[in-house]
Amino acid sequence: MLLYNSATRRRDEFIPNEAGKVSMYTCGPTVYHYAHIGNLRSYIMEDVLEKYLRYAGYDVTRVMNITDVGHLSSDADTGEDKMLKGARREKKTVMEIAKFYTDAFFADCKKLNIKTPDVVAPATSCIDEFIKVIESLLEKGFAYEAGGNIYFDTSKLKQYYIFNDFREEDLEVGVREGVEEDGNKKNKADFVLWFTKSKFDDQELKWESPWGIGYPGWHIECSCISMKYLGESLDIHCGGIDNAFPHHTNEIAQSEAYLGHKWCNYWFHVHHLNTNSGKMSKSSGEFLTVSLLEEKGYDPLVYRLFCLQSHYRKSLVFSYENLDNAAIAYNKMIARVLSLLKEEQGEIDNESFDALKARFCAALDNDMNTALGVTAVYDVLKAKTTPATKLKLIEDFDRVLGLDIVPAARKQYDAEKAAAEQAASDPFIQEIEDMIRQRAEAKKAKNYALADEIRKTLSDKGVTLIDTPQGTKYTID
Ligand code: AMP
Ligand code: ZN
């Protein structure tokens, strides 16, 4: 399997540290607001990666944090804690906000068929681990205290910038537009490991530490939570592309300084969902949620299909027109599976099964080409093989795609069957259908007077007939 690795900037053959096992870490949401559909694009694509690794036979352990403290409104450790901002906005406590938006996040994930990771750890549950690692970084000379805060000293590293070959001075958060400089930092790229009073007036969540009462920086959270649950060597680290710098760059700096060896082998970054006016972001205040799409009548899985139809390393522009096209494609797929369910099933044809499955795997093995993975479903629908083989293949692919294609078709099939059974046991429906048959015969015999009379009799009973190319349908008042 080839997987693009942001650290090497090429598609690498995926080889885990331990044969057959994969450790995977995902940066979780900052729970100060609803997740927007841009955030969820990242989680959908990471979910497909996890599911494909499992499908390919790996035993995956996936860990995700919940950022409930320490993520400041600016990447450069300035501004206030986003959680505090959320709490103030809603006149609630930080923990109330965290609980509410964590639950909302998982409710959205459920609707989108995003599996909950094996371990979900709120940052506030791992304070002791953060303190332990920061103490060690201080001992090793990779960190220093200034103005009451503890900073990571990036000048102590052989290489700090990992993910790109831009000019260093363009990347330094300290010189980014609109970002005020922190005078305590020895180097512009240094970042905070532990904040103390000098960084807040009324921070709600704070803990005792060897450096005074304070709270952890956002970056140290992910390094420590990953090491706590997945050990000293990580196979895959995931996140949206905006996390590559500074968040993931800082994670690598502090984890490798602490461990004294390489930490993570593959970096999987999902590119952004944009609107016509740029990146969708929570801080801009203008964003779309899954609930909003539902209110507009979209099945959340239509959004999942919309994401799968494009490559995770390309930015994706959201528009309702594109979402409508995904809805049409989704409904067509379900309708075609529904007609398969109505056919004589036949035997499983193993040869066709293997050939069509190989196409699906080739798409996903090639740096998670989910668009071609979806095309493989159409290939199955068009293939010259038995309905039983087709259904088995689509169910098999859906373990990765997570679109519920067969269950949705079965639901429609069962509903149609139940309606037919109900009609068969309802004397009024029987009478209507008998009269429709008599009317068809009358028309065939050119007895239009009788046909009209039947229409009138039914109309008097509140039944309106509608002649269509597929036969006569009716509505009952
Ligand atoms: P946050 O809740 O802000 O910590 O972000 C959660 C995840 O969503 C992170 O992996 C971000 O990199 C990712 N993310 C943020 N904005 C977007 C976007 N517009 N498109 C895709 N992913 C995003
Ligand atoms: Zn993270």
Image (cartoon, helix red, strand yellow):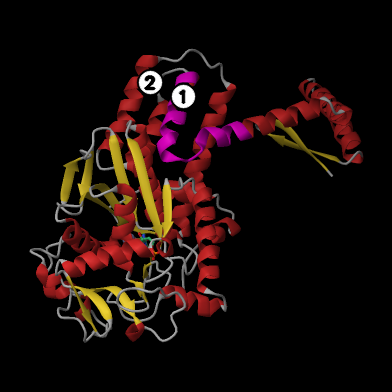
Q: Identify the amino acid type marked 1.
A: Lys
Which residue does the image show at 79% across and 29% down from the upper left?
422
Residue 381 belongs to the span the image colors magenta: no
Residue 340 in sight in this render: yes
Question: Could you tell which of marks 1 and 2 lies nearer the N-terminus?
Answer: 2
> In this picture, is 210 found above or below 293?
below
Quadrant assignment, res 197: bottom left
Segment colored magenta: 388-411
Residue that sits furthest to the front in the current view: 210
User: Quarter of the image containing the C terminus?
Assistant: top right
* Residue at the disc numbered 1: 392
Mark 2, Cα crowd under 10 Å, few <14 / some 14-19 / many 20+, is some
Residue 242 in sight in this render: no
x and y, in percent, of residue 242 in the image: 29, 64
**SS at circle 2:** helix
Residue 178 in the figure: left or right of residue 400: left
Residue that sits furthest to the left in the current view: 158
The answer to which of 425 and 149 lies nearer the viewer is 149
Residue 297 in the figure: left or right of residue 64: right
User: Quarter of the image containing the N terminus?
Assistant: top left
* Residue at the disc numbered 2: 353
